[in-house]
Image (spheres, coloured by chain):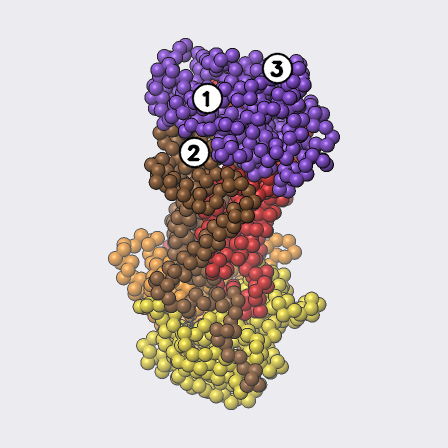
Chain colours: A brown, B red, C orange, D yellow, E purple
Amino acid sequence: MANDVLTRDDSTISGLDALEIASKQKVTSRAGRLWSGTWPKVAAIGIAIFIWQVVVWTGWKPPYSLPPPAEVFSDLGTYVTQGAFWHGLATTLRRAAVGFAAAVAIGLAIGLAVARVRILRAAIGSMITALQTMPSIAWFPLAILLFQLSEQAIFFVVVLGAAPSIANGVIYGLDYIPPLLLRAGRNIGARGASLYRYVIVPAALPAIIAGLKQGWAFAWRSLMAGELLVVIATKTSIGAQLTYARELSEAPRLMSIMIVILVVGLVVDAAFGAADRAVRRRWGVLDQAGA
Amino acid sequence: MANDVLTRDDSTISGLDALEIASKQKVTSRAGRLWSGTWPKVAAIGIAIFIWQVVVWTGWKPPYSLPPPAEVFSDLGTYVTQGAFWHGLATTLRRAAVGFAAAVAIGLAIGLAVARVRILRAAIGSMITALQTMPSIAWFPLAILLFQLSEQAIFFVVVLGAAPSIANGVIYGLDYIPPLLLRAGRNIGARGASLYRYVIVPAALPAIIAGLKQGWAFAWRSLMAGELLVVIATKTSIGAQLTYARELSEAPRLMSIMIVILVVGLVVDAAFGAADRAVRRRWGVLDQAGA
Amino acid sequence: MTSVALTGITKVYGRGPNAVLALDQVSLDVRPGEFVCLVGASGCGKSTLLNLMAGLDRPSGGSVAVEGDSTPGLMFQEPALFPWLTVEANVELPLKLAGVARAERKARVAELLGTVHLGEFGDRQPHELSGGMRQRAALARTLALDTRVLLMDEPFGALDAMTRDILHDELERIWSERQLTVVFVTHNVREAARLSDRIVLLSSRPGRVISETRVDIPRPRRIDSPEVAAVAAKVTEELRKEVGRHGQ
Amino acid sequence: MTSVALTGITKVYGRGPNAVLALDQVSLDVRPGEFVCLVGASGCGKSTLLNLMAGLDRPSGGSVAVEGDSTPGLMFQEPALFPWLTVEANVELPLKLAGVARAERKARVAELLGTVHLGEFGDRQPHELSGGMRQRAALARTLALDTRVLLMDEPFGALDAMTRDILHDELERIWSERQLTVVFVTHNVREAARLSDRIVLLSSRPGRVISETRVDIPRPRRIDSPEVAAVAAKVTEELRKEVGRHGQ
Amino acid sequence: GDDSSGGDSGSSGPVTLRLGYFPNITHAPALVGVEKGIFAEKLGSNVKLETTTFNAGPAAVEAIFSGALDATYIGPNPTVNAFSKSKGEAIRVISGAASGGVALVVKPDINSVDDLKGKKIATPQLGNTQDVALRYWLKEKGITTTKEGGGDVSIVPQENAQTLETFQSGAIQGAWVPEPFVSRLVNAGGKVLVDERDLWPDKKFVITNLIVSKKFLDAHPDVVQKLVDGQVAANDFVNKQPAEAQQAISAHIGKITGKPLDIKLIQQAWPTLTFTNDPIASSLKTGLDHAVAVGLTQPVDLNGLYDLKYLNKALTAAGEPEVVQP
Ligand SMILES: Nc1ncnc2c1ncn2[C@@H]1O[C@H](COP(=O)(O)OP(=O)(O)OP(=O)(O)O)[C@@H](O)[C@H]1O
Ligand SMILES: Nc1ncnc2c1ncn2[C@@H]1O[C@H](COP(=O)(O)OP(=O)(O)OP(=O)(O)O)[C@@H](O)[C@H]1O
Ligand SMILES: [Mg+2]
Ligand SMILES: [Mg+2]
């Protein structure tokens, strides 16, 4: 029976379990951790570019249809050294920030109200998803009607795009707060506003962050469309440049702008990711699997 | 001190607390419950239409710019009795269903993999949000390149729009599974696929449903744009009709289509709502506040 | 003069054929300053009763009246700590909500954590604590409440005997200092005899009050004293009869 | 011949200045078929030790060896029921995962729920149960596991004395029928003396084995028998010394 | 399938011709040709016609580039883009389709060029034909404009769909746009200040022409000939039976957009358009020169863009005068 005894060591904990446990044990240096977080990204990007290059080499499509990586990166190089790019990026980012901030305020308010007030939920709860599905261009006429050709028209479209998504995130988060925590909160004296402040919002925070992330995606996409609403030529923008690149059939430029959009997305995701990891560490649900 | 005694009855539990407790006690008939769920919606819609009508009466904008409700509803009446509408709706709904189904399959697979496999997460985790922010039109050239002018091109755009959102929902859901439940699952013999099937997926189901809802909104919006990719005269679609109503500045028709989109959104939301309520009832988190 | 008065309380969970009659016509008066222990078989409705007293749920029938206009503090059967707050912040929150000044708050929190022997763990998150430590943190949070009535649902269930004995003394001290009214649920009949003025025995499904035992042993008491053992034996006997009758 | 062998186990939680040394050089051999109880102050590392034995966590140092190639079944300190499954389905899941046929599964589940007196509550969701009922459901789920080694973390902590006594008998019966090896954590020293072959006492921070007590009382035992009381008194004394030494 | 009709099938066996066009009045020959079955008839039973519509040029160009489309009706701007971006490889213009139909519509209180100073005028897109026309015209009148919307007259590029809204709401005071937006703006209280035809020799300039992918042209010259035959026949129909053509246009647009285009609007726009098979190559070249002049683009070599031998063959067969191959 002694042979029957199993010594649990590294080799016997395999697969996902190993992945799960591994992280807790490895004590790595700061640089080591940075590297282990970076190389898979670099590898993934490298593989993607390699496949792209191979497809180009096969001559599957003419280069004016599918430009080779080298051409795109050289265009990207030109693009990001132009003033137009930086001005456009600045304009777009500013609009994104302002529009998203407004959407967050409105989305949070609506979400918190709808989730907790029965009559509001019955009245407009189901409207939120419906509004979320409304494409941005449907709002353009209304935006112009209300705000003429001003930046507000853009914000209007962005807010209508993002706020429902954020509100839905908040509602979801509030719906799944463990009842015990709500009861505990009320019992220790949190009522009304303080219940929101000290219990409801922190308890729903993970879901709210997830909702904000989805909301950001909606906001950004709405902005890309909405920036065509008001092409104030003094203010070039990424959204306008994207559309023009397409209208002028500038495939390399279009792809350069896509890369820029991806990079912006990555940066924003990193911010959300940091917030999320901070919350998960606190809640003790970090490192169940990946970083 | 007898005066000091407080009898807790309905009048003393006020505000949100009352709202929270109320639902648990009210034993209403089926019809009564249906009515209490319906009248706030009807009232909300009524108020919205009334405000619209009042704005029209003030003559703030000319009627060709802001058509009165009566005109829109009469156009809606014409619209929904046309074959073009029903064919368009059928085409669009079919595309939405197929595209969304594909997006769900891909989004779930990616989400489950990325959330639990450390190296995948490091490699492409942050790419997901970045992809989500990519506007649909940026994908059009690639869609045409890969799928020519076929329905697949539309599905491609829909999937690229919706799958990242669904994957993000899944990742969020998995990240917040209480570690205790995972451990319990593994201890009772769930490993690998069965851990997913019996523990991970059900535990993350609420978040997955929320992610699917967000994904639906992305899918639908992408579809509205993507339907312009392939417009065959014999196959009209809601997306094409929406764009052309706008391009031809047919304000009443545009609003009719918006109403149709809202109705579709409401129906879909009702389906998600039912699923969500079923889960919440099981988990014992229903009726913390509104229905 | 009552601190908590339950009159003909009935509580039904669910509807239709699945409905559970958790409490049936329970009446109970607790005098101000009284220490009452509730005992009864698992699932007999003790937690339900505390929830009703705390106003967190509404009875299906009957009425609950509580002294003063403050709600009773309730220590739940599970720790119910807020996972997003450190232990310290969890204990501090009731004080913050009551408007206690910052400096005083810090002092009170330190004192309370000391009382439950968690002084070194103030900066930890709840998930970093052991089961018993969480229960003690929850106790500290409940004790931070400035209420006249304290409801406690098996507060020492996850603690070793030594720690529990120490906390019995602490609880008794606080009870008499603050002149609290305490309703205390426990499965440990000795604990009930050690702490309470009166032991109320509930039957199960439906929950009813089936006997009340005055505990007149002079304080301070010791849990291993023969008097406590005698009372415990008597209550145990009754409990055994009740459980036996029920075929539990 | 050992069923569970711990050799020089060390467990550190966290890093840097906040690190907690939960277990320090714990060695413990459990014979096949042995019933071992772990006692120790709250927070001394008992749950940590069970987690390590169950392979749910990895020691910072030392090694864990378990008989056979099955992992031990672990009943957690919290019920850890799956909220999306009914009580029945919770108990059925381990059987399903072990590939037991449907009809047999149903029969086993009914039997197990009967054992823990939850026969009528099979179709309920966990949130509809009382604390003690949840604990019993978790017990049934653990007993549904077909493992040679059973680890139990305060399985009867939330139960009244009567129910617990009945479950002591049931556990003892199952243990001897299935020839299980059991490692059982409890705060109730009498319970330990009632059930175990050996009582292992842990010190706290860091957790170390400080004494082992053989319990040679012939079975069947009764929890209120003088022999059990004598063993309990001895262990309590040791525990008291340890806690006192620690200034806990 | 990739290039399903492009390459190897030669002239034998059934060939699929994938034709694109816009549901727009300036694409009248295409709409009528498809609706009335003129193309189908001319292409014969050996050629399968597949039609797709686009709402804007870029997708059509992308489709041609990727081999998803063989031929399309399209405006002059995307034509130039497609030719220059592919370094002359991707496309050829094989016929014209329509001319005219562009005007500067302004608020009624604007009566002269000078009144435009300080006003906002919309164009469909920065650097497109109308945008260039407006800028060049203003430049000739001595009025300054800048790419950024500054200068004496502020030019705001925006989608045509939006122009109507902004014109009505007063955010812009005029727009240089193609039909049917000219008519729509007029109906919304605007007046035509400049009819672009008046700025061109013979009052003719290209607004729509027919392009074909070079690959398809090389593989199936016979099919291209039939397509051009169809185009000539369609234009013939449009010009000879305007009432029936208008009806067909309205109905066909209705099929695509879900709502038939108001026949009155078609009738209103009709006189401003000329449906000619001549691609008016000179106007395209001149337009490009103007674009260079106002600093919106670099010179582009358009050599080889036109391949009009099929058109001239068709015209000869139809007994009409040939056009000049530039
Ligand atoms: N995840 C964790 N992170 C950090 N510290 C932890 C963690 N889990 C346990 N600890 C610490 O390890 C020590 C032992 O905890 P453990 O849960 O094993 O105690 P225990 O003996 O089971 O106590 P109890 O009887 O109260 O359940 C405690 O000091 C606790 O604070
Ligand atoms: N939310 C609920 N829904 C349905 N039934 C419930 C609910 N909460 C409690 N019950 C039922 O009410 C009865 C009493 O439960 P309660 O929690 O009050 O018992 P308890 O006396 O506290 O038991 P324990 O000692 O096990 O904690 C039980 O039969 C339980 O199943
Ligand atoms: Mg209870
Ligand atoms: Mg423990």
Establish if B87 lies above or below E33: below
Establish if B95 lies above or below C155: above
> How far across and down, in percent of the image, does residue D41 sit?
40, 76
User: Mark 2: few, some, or many residues within 10 Å (few <14, many ≥20)?
Assistant: many
User: Mark 3: few, some, or many residues within 10 Å (few <14, many ≥20)?
Assistant: few
Give the camera-side residue of E286 and D120.
E286
Q: Chain of mark 1?
A: E
**Could you tell me how far apart the alpha carbons at marks 1 and 2 are, in whole angstroms?**
24 Å
Q: Tell me, yes or no, if residue E10 can be seen here.
A: yes
Which mark is nearer the camera, 3 or 2? 3
**Could you tell me how far apart the alpha carbons at marks 3 and 2 are, in whole angstroms?**
44 Å
Mark 1 = which residue?
A: E287
Q: What is the three-letter code of the residue carrying label 1? A: Gly
Establish if D21 lies above or below E206: below
> How far across and down, in percent of the image, does residue C125 sit?
38, 62
Label ID, residue E321? 3
N-term-proximal mark, 1 vs 3: 1
Give the camera-side residue of E281 and E56.
E281
In what quadrant does ligand 4 lie? bottom left
For disc 3, does the CB lie below 8 Å from ligand 1?
A: no
Q: What is the three-letter code of the residue carrying label 3? A: Pro
For disc 1, does the CB lie below 8 Å from ligand 1?
A: no
Label ID, residue A289? none
**Residue at horizontal 39%, vertical 54%?**
A274
Q: Is residue E39 left or right of residue A130?
A: right
Q: Tell me, yes or no, if residue E265 can be seen here.
A: no
Mark 2 = which residue?
A: A240
Which mark is nearer the camera, 1 or 3? 3
Q: What is the three-letter code of the residue carrying label 2? A: Ala
Q: Is residue D206 left or right of residue B288?
A: left
**Residue at horizontal 50%, vertical 56%?**
B114
Q: Chain of mark 2?
A: A
